[in-house]
Amino acid sequence: MFDRLIRIAEHRAAALLVVAALTLQPLTAAHAGPNEQATRLFERLTGTPPSTSVLTQMASDISSHDYTDAANLAINDPGHAFYNVTIRNFAQPMSNKPQSLFVPLNDYTATIIGMVRDNMPFNTVLSQDVIYVGDPSKVSGLPAYAYNNDNQYEYMDNANADLAAVLMAQTQSSVTGIPSAATAGVLTTYAGASAYFYAGTNRAMVRFTMMDYLCDDLQTIEDTSRPPDRIRQDPSRSPGGDSRTFLTQCIGCHSGMDALAGAFAYYNFVPTCDPATGCPAFNIPGQMVYTPGQVQQKYAINTGNFPQGYVTTDDSWINHWRQGPNSLLGWSSSLPGSGNGAKAFGQELENTQQFATCQVQKAFQAMCLRPPSNAADRAEVSQITSDFVSGNYNLKTAFAESAVYCMGQ
Amino acid sequence: MRITTTCGLALLAAALLSACSGGAATTANPNTSQQSTQNVYTGPPPATPDVEAFEQNLWVNIEGSNRCGACHGVGGSGSPSFARSDDINQAYQAALSVVNLSQPSNSTMVAQENAGHNCWLSSNSACADIVTTWITNWAGGASGSSAGTQITLTAPPDITVGATKVYPSDPTLFASTVYPVVQAWCSRCHSDTAASPQSPYFASATLATAYAYAQPLMDLNTPTNSMFYIRLAQQSHNCWGNPVSCPNSAATMLAAIQAFANQVTVTPIDPSLIVSKALSLTQGTVASGEGRYDAHDIAKWQFQEGQGLTAYDTSGVDPAMNLSLNGNISWAGGWGITLGTGGASAQATTATSSKLAQKIQASGQYSIEMWIDPANTTQTNADVVAYADSATSNNFAFAQDAVQYQGYALSTVNPSGTALTTNPDDNDDSLAQAALQHVVMTYDPTNGRKIYVDGQLSCVPATGGPCPAGVDVDKMTGGALTNWDPSSLFILGSAPGGQRAWQGTIKFVAIHDVALTQQQVQQNYAAGVGATYYLLFDVSSLTNTPQSYVMFQASQYDNYSYLFFRPTFISLDSSWTPTAPIAIQGIRLGENGQELPVDQAYIPLNVTIDEKDYSATTGQLLSPIGTVIPLQNGPTSDQFFLTFAQIGSNSHTYTESVPTPSAPVDLAPSSDIGVRLWDELNNTMANVTTVPLTATAPLATYQNVQQQLPNVTDMESATAANVISAAQLAVSYCQSLLASPGTYFPGLTSAQFAAPATSVLTPGSGMDLIASPLIQNLTGQGAGGQALATQPADATVRSEIYNLIQALESDTPGASTQTVTMGVCTALLSSATSLIK
């Protein structure tokens, strides 16, 4: 009888869904009062509806134009859904190569959640010696942090732990054992390394970091006019016997990407699974290794494809994309545009104008459920970006201001 | 007793000698096509080891009347008499005047063959190569190594960079010619405002942006070299038309580029540039052939002919295994043959192929050495080379099997010709690549086969399984070659009969009658392949240094490009030293009057020539890397030059134009509301039902269905699976709620929950006992006395709940209040009031 009841209920739910969908009123200037604005502001920031008391307080704040107070009520709601849901969903796809939301919680995502909670300047996410781990005094039975798995985070996730309450900041170097100078924020977390230093040639770390933090994939960045002096020996200059392919396509990405990927010459992720028989798509068992002064073998594979190519001898990198069309990314004039190692690479990216714009665009998309779509949206994103930068890269403000903009008027 | 060769037909020889010495107005060439026979040398013995090396390596190959002996023998018309057969010591002295032992390819004899002087083959270059080999072997002595060969650099002709067409700074011409074409047909991808932008943005809505991106893709001097045209004409890249026609699309594009080019006037090279002198590839000094170990070549093909249907065996070892080219085969630029689809091969005759069996069965060991460029890494069981009777029976073969290579070697321990496959258990370790590779298979009776790729011993596990580094063992080891079939056919590109066809380019093949050592393999790998030249770009006037050059090594890389590498500063004045440092920065390569728009690898270069690093013999290396630049008109026509940001006291400031941000484009209006994501939905359900997130049943359901819950907020992407999964989760939460409802339903007691629904949920106030709390908690409507315009109206939902209660009571007679409440809770919780935010 129960199954039958469920089927009926589901059938009626479908009817209710239609009714509700038809009845739900899109917010417009004509419809949105403080209650509706407060509801949407809360829902966008947390993904959940507000309690009656919070709704009342937020509506009151909105009526008196205290939008920041209203947003902060949502952000600081005791359920911490802003951190545990919204920021988690913001960070999670960046922590794995398939860009999936549905991966177990990991140290990459947890570190971003913690940085946002603690108002850490987000323009250090790719360079700082920081990691967020679970506080064992707040989670019963919590496994110790390990640099070769995500067991601690999966444990917290399975226990539905309130991440915003149980995460605590540590220096990454102290818990992972790698030198502080070799840390590069989330890039050198276990999850970051297992995603982007595993196998391959470490170019993935460049590509995905640009995708995630500059909102630009290679197809929009490629520029065939940059010097190819740093392209390694492994890309064939005559794929299939036709060098035109290289001269018109391959060079566009490799000239800039290979020049940057030198930053990771001392990094590798050594799996404990057997790649020949299959490793998981994410959270691969194994550990990042850092070999200062010794270039990883992956930088010298297929050297015969073009013996006259660049031979990596250290972890130096140079940013050829500072010139040409990609100068529009807004590289920091206070940085030299070249350097050594992952930390300097991270600083090069996180101090671009595009980095700030990208974070705000992502926040805007999450809060408004659309990309900036018209002149008003673009102007707002520009203003929020300006506030984000001048506000010491506090990511909460980007979300809060975006949510307020889209709560209706 | 010494064995020598002489003319087989005495009468004919006499006639030829007569012709040579007759002094007639027109002279008949010697008959170099006839067969020679061995003869006995009865003259004085060689006076020195070098005379003996001359005799064994050069003289024995040329003294016959079918070679040089017809004219350059005793009393012949030709002078000097280096082919005389009466006294090997006098022949040696004569030969010294026509050979260059330090650089055999620069010998007078070789130059004569290149000029067509009585070449006995139809290819002058093949004769020249063969004579070069003989002289090289003489120069190398017993080792046969030419490692001591040195290149003598010579000053190139003095050529000034010519005029050319350059892009006008004003994009107006572009806007009226090419721009309309690319905007019409390419803007869906190659525009910065496209839905999925694909760089380069030559079809941008912003003209300045489009023009900047388009310039590298056009060639105003030779419009057919424009990539815009080539992509359509030769690569069928997104052609257009109805029906789609690449020829028509290409013609349209070419016409537009030509219209653009026709309106651009030829201008001298920018006088503000700092420019070297110019020269073409073939005006350089030949650099190839250095350092090869070829003492035991018994057959060799360099594929230099470039035309015709024969590739000549230039090993100099008779009988020559000249290959006839069949099927879809073409000559590759920079030496080589390309075997295409549909079947292609290059094969010797069974008669000449027997040379291999004769030599190799005697030595009991051999090596197959090749430079190849596979067309792809998907072809399997494809014979690059075979010495075989059929596709299933061979003496040896070397094949590509996707990303691995396979070596076949018939022997007494391997009578069925089982293949040795590189890395059979790990295709992630790809050995065969669609790139130029040096591949060698050696065979000796002790170790059997070894396969080298680009100088490195391939990893071949003896027992299968993981492949330890550095291991290369043929578990079948080696044996005798007594079971070889000497009537087999040597063939490149397939097995005899055309089976096991292989596609790709072959640039070099050599068969050795020894198993090369790893050192010898690496020596030959380092020697490279193809026609390589030293190009000396004169910068004397720029550096105020006599006979100073920036020297590149260069070669034709494939049919579409040149390779330039190892730029070196050198003065041909060996007494010169850089007493004052010379700064060199930012070298750019120019071709046919224009700086190239792509692959300028030496822009970042910043070197100072100084006494510390400069050598009078080798100069000073500026950069160890190489770069590939486009071929435009061909190696004899394309004229190269260099420009500098700084050289010596001359400098030029390069400034890049400031890119123009693309104009933003408004997107179509989109929904103001969206679907809650998976975890948002879970948190929402927990929140509104007051069931903890950690409750066992909902948590289990959530973990089970979470990947079916929405993962994007776009309502148009919502699927039936999303809704059904949400309903499943709602069931779980409502079950947990009703298991211990507490005060959630303030008007209902435990007894009422257990009682039949029909007795409790009476129309109106009875039904409101569950409708009111559910509406307030699950939709937020009316909670705290607040009305929300963004949620469905209370009355609308309440009416639906009434209907649902009645339906449940009717369909499930006797159902309890709790059961019916369960249904109502599930229906409302999984509705749009929760799903949509």
Image (cartoon, coloured by chain):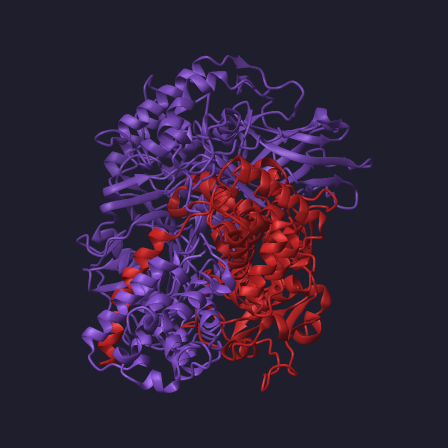
Chain colours: A red, B purple
- Image coordinates for residue A296, horizontal then vertical, percent: 59, 64
Does residue A8 sit above or below B463 in this rendering? above
| Residue sitting nearer the eye, A26 or A143 | A26
Does residue B785 sit above or below A143 in this rendering? above
| Residue sitting nearer the eye, A30 or B420 | A30
The C terminus of chain B lies in which quarter of the figure?
bottom left
- Quadrant of the image occupied by residue B744: bottom left
Residue at 63%, 75% in the rendered image: A166
Q: Is residue B398 visible?
A: no
- Image coordinates for residue B168, horizontal then vertical, percent: 54, 18
- Image coordinates for residue B58, horizontal then vertical, percent: 44, 46
Residue lying at the far right of the rendered structure: B579
| Marker count (numbered) | 0
- Image coordinates for residue A101, horizontal then vertical, percent: 46, 63
| Residue sitting nearer the eye, B37 or B608 | B608
Does residue B465 sit above or below B180 in this rendering? below
Q: Is residue B304 visible?
A: yes
Residue lying at the far front of the rendered structure: B765
The N terminus of chain B lies in which quarter of the figure?
bottom left
Residue at 64%, 82% in the rendered image: A136
- Quadrant of the image occupied by residue B745: bottom left
| Residue sitting nearer the eye, A284 or B303 | A284
| In-image side of A35 versus A127 (left or right) | left
| In-image side of A225 versus B751 (left or right) | right
